[in-house]
Image (cartoon, rainbow, N blue to C red):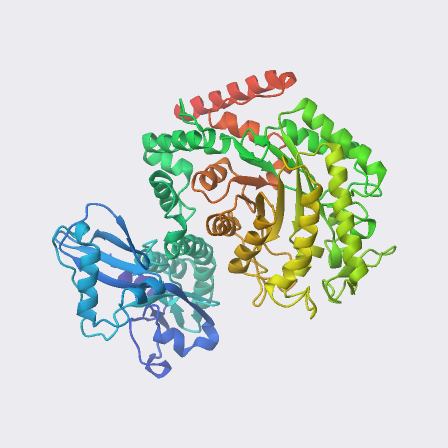
Amino acid sequence: MHLLAILQERAAELGIALRYEAEVNGAEGIPEADLVVAADGANSVVRNAFAQHFRPDIEVRANKYIWLGTPRVFGAFTFIFEETRFGWIQAHAYRYDRDTSTFIVECPETVWRGLGFDRLPAAEGVALCERLFARWLGGELLLSNAGHLRDPWLNFAWVSNAHWSHRNVVLIGDAAHTAHFWIGSGTKLALEDGIALAACLAAEHTLAGALERYEETRRIEVLRLQSAARNSTEWFENVGRYAAFEPLQFAYSLLTRSQRVSHENLRLRDRAWLEGVESWFLGRATGRTAQQPVPPMFAPFALRGMELANRVVVSPMATYSATDGAPDDFHLVHLGARAQGGAALVFTEMTCVEPSGRITPGCTGMYDEAHLAAWRRIVAFVHRCTPAKIALQLGHSGPKGSTRRGWEGMDEPLADGNWPVIGPSAMPWSPHNQVPRAMADADFVRVRDAFVRATEMAGACGFDMVELHCAHGYLLSAFLTPLTNRRTDRFGGDLANRLRFPLDVFTAMRAVWPAEKPMSVRISATDWVAGGVDAAEAVAIARAFRAAGADIIDVSAGQTSTAAQPVYWRMFQTPFSDRIRNEAGVPTLAVGNIYDADHVNSIIAAGRADLCCLARPHLADPYWTLHAAVQQGHDVPWPEPYLLGRDQYVRNRRRAADLAANV
């Protein structure tokens, strides 16, 4: 049955009439019907008529595109990339019917202007597209019905709405939400909306209840698809970022661009091709021809003189379990167990360089001789009993200091015993936190020297790497973001000035850290606040630290302002890592809701990061990496006392797989 007929039938069961409005002329054109279904597209007149109720958010994307056709029939969805002297231009081609194909041409505006499309009449612009893609068109022409338009080129409008219904009016399809043609799901989304609306009309006893249920049931799935579409959109807007990839990795990056198609999805689609990718990646990592395919997460990686057995990292995680800054047996077991668990690199939690630089009374420190002995014991265990490397993350809490342990109230001031805090400006983290004292010249010298001393102590303990924490609103992060750095001297204002003190600290640390050992810097790649640090500025920050001697950038995001509006999804910070790695030309660690081996393999093989940091998965399972190896049929060394446990785990996995296959 036609979807409209189904909707009419379901509405009739509620005793209401249904009008389907594909086009109306303003609010006055909407009839007094019991239900109006508005499917009038991305430029919806109905939505605009009631904008104060639907509250649309429309974002115009960067690339220009033109929708064309061709008699050349493409047998499969085809992506075509051509390099011009102005940059890359690409086409998306797919079969439309028996005799024709859709042929969408798009490019960045700089390329569009450079090629002269902004000045050419429509017909001449189409002719230029024919010349640019001639070798793919097989002598066929490009067809256009846009000859009557002065400018047939468009920018995609990303549409979302706070609400999808108002009284008797409900939005479906592009009127409610758009997903770019790069995903190719606009029509599919509209049909699924209609099906869901019909089901809700049948299930509920009132129109209001049906519309509320429709929005509840559809919104999450739509957000997931829009998130994937956004990732895909950004990939195609930045083709030049990946153009230097070898063809195999370029294709892999293209196929996994949305993060909905993953490493194991590709194995199901074409095992032989994916194993070719795995062998290629291992060969690049080792410099030797791979004898057999290996999951990318188990390819080795080196930074200066530090050689890592795989790409899995235990992320820094605050445990709030130290006494007067000193780690104890808890930290020995906590870090030691995770080092035994197969991850190639284990980070300490943020370790503070002076007592007043602690976040909480339970935070670890590196400023006292007692700390030196305690950390040396932990490092010695990791090196003696595991193949893992261990890194010390050094930081200063700044305006976010003197607070309770995380489980007692995150970022909440201590009930008593507070110590004074400092910052770039006298701006508190929140109205409930202390107002920090703006740093003076003596503070800059003291804090820098504290970082240097902690770095020297890290060397004495035998740490393999040191990371400088410049993220999450702590002291050095507070200098980087204009949201908290309101200084008018040489340490505030433009980015070069805001970088000055963090770079001074890093440079001084690098000078005393052994040349053969690497250093990393953790940054917040976005503040998630308008007017704060954004992804473009994060690239500049990464470049600055790279020039100062940083070997890898640990790419996090947010936690720099209580006004932040983050958007969470699987691997939600990976796009920032991708951009920094492939624009700034610096290795990166990706972090943020990475919890599955499939995530790690996809990120690493696609060149979106060089290492993957996992936090919560390692809290739940210290042996996450060893288990991931077994699950993928890959053999890695286990601690010898645990070999019997490994063998039973392997047997149980095989037994479960056999049972599932025979069901």
Residue 359: where, in percent of width, then height?
A: 76, 51
Looking at the image, residue 95 sits to the left or right of residue 386; the answer is: left
On the image, which quarter does residue 29 sit in? Answer: bottom left
The N terminus - image quarter: bottom left
Foreground residue among 203 and 266: 266
Residue 26 in the image: above or below residue 163 = below
Residue 398 in the image: x percent, y percent?
75, 56
Whether residue 146 can be seen here:
no
Residue 445 location in percent, x, y?
78, 55
Residue under the image location 65 percent in, 54 percent down: 503
| Left or right position of 99 against 354 | left
Q: How many marks?
A: 0
Residue 70 in the figure: left or right of residue 496: left
* Residue 599 in sight: yes
In front of the other: 352 or 161: 352
Q: Nearer the viewer, residue 604 or 451?
A: 451
Question: Which quadrant is the C terminus positioned in?
Answer: top left
- Residue at 58% in and 40% down: 614
Which residue is at the far right?
A: 417
Determine the image quadrant of residue 127.
bottom left
Q: Position of residue 653 (x, y in %)?
A: 50, 23
- Front-most of 142 and 490? 490
